[in-house]
Amino acid sequence: MVALSKYPVKHRWNRCGLVGVLLVVCVFGMVATARGEQVTMAIDNYPPYHIIPEDGGEPYGETISIVKAVVGRVNRHGGFDFTLSYTPDTPFKRCLQMMKKGEADIMGGLFNKADREAYMEMLEYKGRSNKIFVLPKTSRITITSHEDLQGLKIGTQLGFLYFDTFDTDPTLHKAPVVRIKQNMHKLLKGRIDTFVLSEIQFNSLNEAYPALTAQLKVAEYVYDQANPVCIGISRQSFLMAPVYLDIFRKVVTDMRTSGEFVRILEAFYGAYHSKKP
């Protein structure tokens, strides 16, 4: 009060009004800048979810198709001009660290867990992702239930989550690797007993490495319960500003309830499999 009393009322209002105008200009300036902002998606080479062509072409895949469609819809709804770019082939665990630090803006194909919610806004787009266990064809091991995993050395992938019963079981012997192909080699060399992955991922491996997968078989135990899959937005990203995040939330909800995500996946896999000889 003492400091303000130096100025007449009129001058105080002029000063406050100027500050208000400057704040409005700054806010609208930020929005205008972000309208043409680049959105960085963290990806690893993980067919069929993320496929990074060897010839340097644009990455594509199931998850990339979903995120591209969402960003395109957000642009139309919000009048933005976001462009989607991708990290180089980055190990999954490093992708999560990039999201935590705000070095990437968005990821897809994520399970919603409490630790991830601490640094990402999670937007559900798919209701399930079946998980399977793979064995050598010559193996005498049978896996018909979760209990049969006890005592086995199970190949996993660094940073990946599969399903709650598996992820939270401290009695299981898990042996993580950086790349999924490493698990196939380890399995065939007898260094692990089995490895876990999604059913879709195994189908993709079968197409990419038929000589290897011909030596493998799928165990009877399949986890096929609901385990929602999400898009994650880094809490350190500019996309967390309400003017953007509110539209992302609405777009993802609308696309999920309308069945559009299912249609995108069907179109992707129709084109993907048609390219195979």
Image: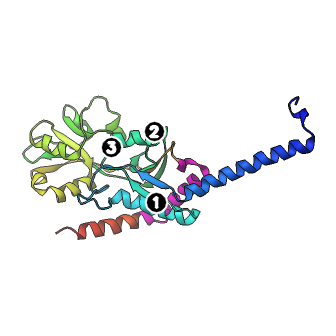
Q: Which residues are magenta?
A: 238-261
Residue type, mark 3 in image: Phe
Residue type, mark 2 in image: Lys
Image x and y of residue 223, in percent: 30, 47
Image x and y of residue 262, in percent: 40, 64
State yes or no: discs 1 and 3 in contact (Cβ < 8 Å).
Answer: no
In the picture, the quarter occupied by the C terminus is: bottom left
Q: Earlier in the sequence, mark 2 or mark 3?
A: 3
Q: On the rendered structure, is 207 left or right of 26?
A: left
Residue wearing tag 2: 101
- The residue that appears at 34% across and 59% down in the rendered structure is 62
Please tell me in which quadrant of the rendered image residue 192 appears.
top left
Front in this rendered view, residue 222 or 153 = 153
Residue 258 among those drawn in magenta: yes
Residue wearing tag 1: 83
Residue type, mark 1 in image: Thr
Q: Earlier in the sequence, mark 1 or mark 3?
A: 1
State yes or no: discs 2 and 3 in contact (Cβ < 8 Å).
Answer: no
Looking at the rendered image, the disc whose residue lies closer to the viewer, 2 or 3, is: 2
- For the question of whether residue 160 can be seen, the reply is no
- Numbered disc 3: secondary structure: helix
Residue 270 among those drawn in magenta: no
Q: Residues within 10 Å of mark 1 (few under 14, many from 20)?
A: some
Q: Main secondary structure of the magenta part?
A: helix
- The residue that appears at 29% across and 38% down in the rendered structure is 158
- For the question of whether residue 135 can be seen, the reply is yes
Image x and y of residue 19, in percent: 76, 45
- Numbered disc 2: secondary structure: helix
Image x and y of residue 123, in percent: 48, 51
Residue wearing tag 3: 92
Q: On the rendered structure, is 143 left or right of 265?
A: left
Q: On the rendered structure, is 65 left or right of 208?
A: right
